[in-house]
Amino acid sequence: MEAFSSLISRAEEEGFIRGFKVKRRRGEGVSVSHLLFSDDTLLFCEDNRDQLVFWKWVVICFEVVSSLKINLQKSKIILVGGVEEVDRAAAVFGCKVGNLPTTYLGLPLGVPHNSCRVWDGVEERFKRKLAMWKKQYLSKGGRLTLIKSTLSNLPIYFMSLFVIPRKVRIRLEKIQREFLWGDMEERRKIHLVRWAVICKDKRHGGLGLRH
């Protein structure tokens, strides 16, 4: 992918393609034309047919040089702002038209950072994990270990980037609380200890869960 990045940078230096500007507190800012991570790539350009054609040539050159093939069936062109002739832009690359919001590296794009929708993916992963574990007989100790090792860690990546809304925090705590006490969809069990107490440090009579 370093070769691909070099081709893009060269084309940008020659003025064939342009990304977008990220303003800094001081100075003119940074131009961003692409983001690469493993085999996930984001390309940015203006709504300009000439630029789209140059982007297409950059992709073709990369495929010829590297002997790699970009899977256009899994690629999408996503429009930001008022863009006309969407189908024409997609036809240049031969890919599908996507919409915001979407996801990149597991993170939502095009959703307000303080929106509860940002956390939909985290809640969905919580539920998928529980659907698998609820079919098994687990002791309280086993449930506690799973909460500590898996469920409590799922939101950490998101929390490093977004402020978790109170509604979402309450819902995630509810999922963990019900799993700990063995609640099932068809029956509920009494919660013998308050969640706030369970989340206290073991030295203070709790179980050391993250609150």
Image: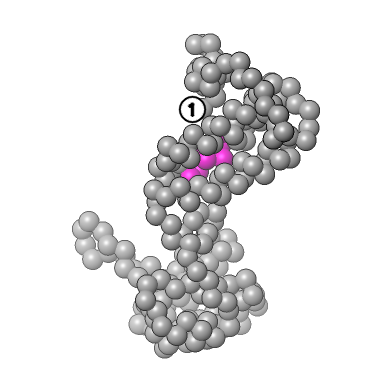
Q: Residue 59, percent across and down?
A: 54, 80
Q: Which residue is mark 1?
A: 211
Q: Residue 181, percent across and down?
A: 65, 24
Q: Farthest front residue?
A: 186
Q: Residue 23, percent across and down?
A: 27, 62
Label tally? 1
Residue at coordinates 45% horizontally, 39% vertically from top-left? Answer: 167
Evaluate whether residue 67 shows in this view: yes
Magenta span of residues: 152-158
Horizontal side, residue 28 vs residue 158: left or right: left
Residue 30 within the segment the image draws in magenta:
no
Name which quarter of the figure residue 34 lies in.
Answer: bottom left
Evaluate whether residue 9 shows in this view: no
Residue 157 within the segment the image draws in magenta:
yes
Query: Of 95 and 50, which appears nearest the observer?
Result: 95
Q: Amino acid at mark 1?
A: His
Residue at coordinates 78% horizontally, 32% vertically from top-left? Answer: 136
Horizontal side, residue 39 vs residue 182: left or right: left
Residue at coordinates 61% horizontally, 76% vertically from top-left? Answer: 72
Residue at coordinates 41% horizontally, 83% vertically from top-left? Answer: 84
